[in-house]
Image (cartoon, rainbow, N blue to C red):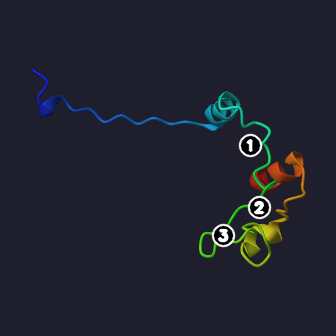
Amino acid sequence: MWGNDMVKDVLIVLGNGFSIDFVSFIKKKDQIDLSNLFSNGDKVLWPADNQPGFLSKYRCPALWELGARPNINAVQSSTIFFN
């Protein structure tokens, strides 16, 4: 009765609300700042050499030119995304 002709595609779209709830659920809210994704950019490892400093003028010059810095606050961070 449930042959291949009954196969359905399912698309699940998860937004930022899910991310915020999930981070709270796993009790990592103090470690993962979803309101300011740049806040730990100097600590994130660069994939090619596993050295910290993903967010730097050397590694991400375009973001750096836009004003992305690890020490900016959440309001400043959001203006980079929404302007």
**First along the sequence among labels 1 and 3:** 1
Q: Which residue is mark 2?
A: 43
Q: Which mark is residue 69?
A: none
Q: Which mark is residue 46?
A: 3
In the figure, residue 5 lies in which quadrant?
Answer: top left
- Residue found at x 85% / y 64%: 67
Q: Which residue is mark 1?
A: 34
- Residue found at x 82% / y 53%: 39
Q: Is residue 49 above or below residue 12?
A: below
Q: Is residue 28 above or below residue 73?
A: above
Amino acid type for the residue under numbered disc 3: Trp
The residue lying toward the viewer, choosing from 56 and 17, is: 56
- Residue found at x 61% / y 32%: 18
Amino acid type for the residue under numbered disc 2: Lys
Amino acid type for the residue under numbered disc 1: Leu
Q: Is residue 7 above or below residue 73?
A: above
- Residue found at x 60% / y 37%: 15
Do the CB atoms of the residues marked 1 and 2 lie less than 8 Å apart?
no
